[in-house]
Image: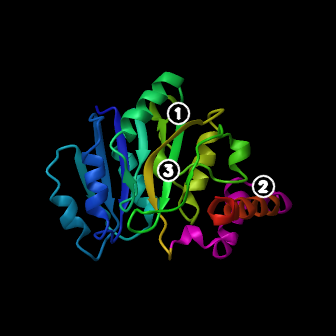
Amino acid sequence: MPEVSIITPCYNSARFLPETIQSVLNQTFTDWEWLITDDCSSDNSVEIIKKINDPRVVLTIAKKNAGAGNARNLSLEKASGKYITFLDADDFWEANFLEEMVSFMKREKAELAYSNYARCDENLVPKIADFQADKEVTFKNLLKTCRLSLLSSMYDSERVGKEFFPSGSKREDHVMWLNLLQKIPVGKPLNKTMAKYRMHASSISRKKTNIMKDQYLVYKDYMHFSTLKSFYYTANWAINGFMKYSKIFN
């Protein structure tokens, strides 16, 4: 059994896959498995993945296009590692990411941890200041802003179990983290930048005004909060989201 399971959904990511693949193969920590699920790509993503000559890489091809959350779940079902971490097919890890995160998890006896990450353009050139892992994360403070990014977080599946992504939500990563943090008291910060996030101009996560309703449903439908309480946390999330990405605050 590998110590780390890396979970990656892939959909039409051929343009960025070579850099992502190389960032995993370059890891100084080598006891990992990489579970990639292709979500019915129409480009040559599958061909690129199949050319990886490494038995630690396991490719699953989804039967139908059902979104990144479902693709991650298909990989999670097969994951056997103690530590679970995520990397989208267009993002990038520095070579020491897994080594630093695993060491930190063991040293701190952490059930969940997250690190800084660089916020870059599509060419991996820094665009705004690095996102800082400078606060412990709890269920309560994660309600107001999602400080946990999939590409820079890791959790201990032996201690907390696997946490799957909900179906039907466009904010499935936030729901997943909230569900996880209802099981554990805290996620711990590692204040080192070891990952690069591509900020696409067309990214859904950047268009805050377009997903206010989806975020409201995180609280109303998935956390089962009252209407008033759901509006309160949606407003907090929107304000914090603006501050997170605005150059004024970075």
Q: Position of residue 138 (x, y in %)?
A: 68, 39
Disc 3 crowd rating (10 Å Cα; few below 14, some 14-19, many 20+) is: many
Q: Is there a contact, CB below 8 Å, between mark 3 and mark 2?
A: no
Q: In the drawing, does residue 228 fall left or right of residue 103? A: right
Q: Tell me the kind of residue under disc 3.
A: Tyr
Q: Secondary structure at mark 3?
A: strand
Q: Which residue is mark 3?
A: 117
Identify the magenta region.
203-230
Q: Which residue is mark 2?
A: 225
Instruction: Name the quadrant of the N terminus.
Output: top left
Instruction: Name the quadrant of the C terminus.
Output: bottom right
In the rendered image, which quarter is residue 82 located in? top left
Of 228 and 144, nearer the camera is 144
Q: Is there a contact, CB below 8 Å, between mark 1 and mark 3?
A: no
Disc 1 crowd rating (10 Å Cα; few below 14, some 14-19, many 20+) is: some
Q: Secondary structure at mark 1?
A: helix
Q: Which residue is mark 1?
A: 160
Disc 2 crowd rating (10 Å Cα; few below 14, some 14-19, many 20+) is: some
Residue at (68% x, 60% y) in the render: 249
In the rendered image, which quarter is residue 32 located in? top left
Is residue 121 magenta-colored? Answer: no
Q: Earlier in the sequence, mark 1 or mark 3?
A: 3
Q: Nearer the viewer, mark 1 or mark 3?
A: 3
